[in-house]
Amino acid sequence: MSNMIINNMDKDWGTLIITYGLSDEQVKAVEASLPIKRCEVYKADFISDIIALPQMASIVMWNVLTQDDKEVFVDYYREMAPYIDEKVVLIGDVDVPKDLKKYLVIYPSFEELSDKMKYILLNAYKKKKKNINFSRSLSNTLMVLRRIRQKPYITTRELSEDIEMTPRTIQRYIETLRMAGEFIEYDTHKKGWHLQDGKSVLLRDIFD
């Protein structure tokens, strides 16, 4: 893994574009097409950086890869391509299996990619942002559920302070959990939230 990436492991990977095999001039062209200022472009030293790190897009000069690197790339993306949300752009005479091509963006040359660069990166950013927001909402919802299970009759204000969200947001997550099948009840005497019988459906208490 490249030192530049190791030294920036606290970054927002949802705005990262990794390049491999591009010249300095080509990297500058990518930087000129960024959808937002917060996006950053890294030149990877190894093909494994592209496989290992979260990103919104990768741009790879296919012809500079060794045969071993190509095999690693194909093996990984044939298995994972249907499940990942980053945009993968390959440039050159790309000889990947036909079933894999539908998950990739392929251009014969960087010049042909340049005309579409802004559009491709903007779409990649929007898709990544949407998926990150969904994942964050799911994580926050489960956090609310765990706190209610851990501390029966916890108040909305306590949840708000513990998880650092507004009371209105807490209420919205609780309604989401109820719609998902959780028996979350509000005790009017204790003025707090609790799970019926202290058990959660999503956390599989009922099935244990």
Image (spheres, rainbow, N blue to C red):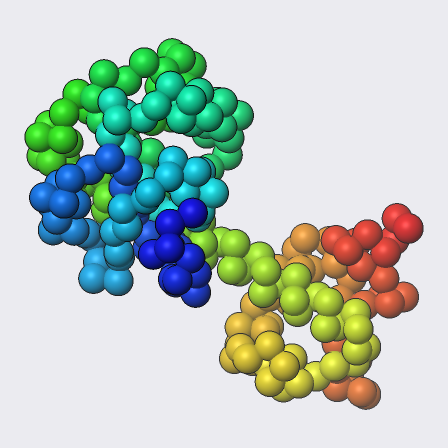
Residue at 39% x, 62% y: name it. 7
Residue at 11% x, 36% y: name it. 114
Q: Please say whether residue 3 is visible from this viewpoint.
A: yes
**Horizontal arrangement in the rendering, residue 113 relative to residue 179 (left or right):** left
Give whichever of 136, 184 is nearer the camera. 136
**Horizontal arrangement in the rendering, residue 6 relative to residue 42 (left or right):** right
Total tally of numbered discs in the picture: 0
Q: Position of residue 186 (x, y in %)?
A: 75, 76
Can you tell which quarter of the image residue 26 is in?
top left
Residue at 26% x, 26% y: name it. 64
Q: Position of residue 203 (x, y in %)?
A: 77, 55
Give whichever of 132, 30 is nearer the camera. 30
Q: Position of residue 52 (x, y in %)?
A: 47, 43
**Horizontal arrangement in the rendering, residue 26 relative to residue 69 (left or right):** left
Asked if residue 39 is positioned above or below residue 123 in the image, the reply reads: below
Asked if residue 192 is positioned above or below residue 81 in the image, the reply reads: below
Residue at 13% x, 30% y: name it. 110
